[in-house]
Amino acid sequence: MSAETAHWEKVCQVGDIPDGGVIGLEVGETPVALVRTGGEVFALHDVCSHAEVRLSEGEVYDHTLECWLHGSCFDLRSGKPTGPPATRPVNVYRVKIEGDDVYVSLSKE
């Protein structure tokens, strides 16, 4: 699906996401964790694939998001776990920035 046909939803302003931090929000009924690091914004499914807790309550390290409960880290670009105990990736979603507005698309590419 091209960017032109994807459904984009405005979710927040860039400044709403702390630099080097994460916020959790809902896009429709889907929980999404938005991370801002290194001048980029990433969107991941906001539920750990190991323990079913909110990843947005975790910490950002380099290009990973660490689950607060058991310490599983997920790559911001791929959603793949970078260490145990998680073994399954979380979904990642496309993000675009227009001015100060952050848009997320839950559509599959």
Image (tube, rainbow, N blue to C red):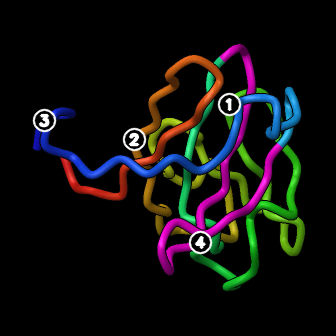
- Residue at the image point whose x is 50% and y is 36% from the top: 77
Magenta stretch prevailing secondary structure: strand
- Residue at the image point whose x is 63% and y is 79% from the top: 50
Towards the viewer: 94 or 4? 4
Q: Quadrant of residue 39?
A: top right
Comes first in the chain, label 4 or label 3: 3
- Residue at the image point whose x is 13% and y is 35% from the top: 2
Which amino acid type corresponds to the residue marked 1 in the rendered image? Answer: His
Q: Which segment did they paint magenta?
A: 22-39
**How far, Cα to Cα, is label 1 from label 2?**
16 Å
Name the mark on residue 6.
Answer: none
The image shows residue 5 at horizontal and vertical percentages of 13, 43
Residue at the spot of label 2: 94
- Residue at the image point whose x is 51% and y is 46% from the top: 10
Residue at the spot of label 3: 2
**Category of crowding for the residue at label 3, using alpha-carbon neighbours closer than 10 angstroms: few (below 14), some (14–19), many (at least 20):** few
Residue at the spot of label 1: 63
Q: Is residue 52 magenta?
A: no
Which amino acid type corresponds to the residue marked 2 in the rendered image? Answer: Arg
Towards the viewer: 28 or 59? 28
Comes first in the chain, label 4 or label 2: 4
Which amino acid type corresponds to the residue marked 3 in the rendered image? Answer: Ser
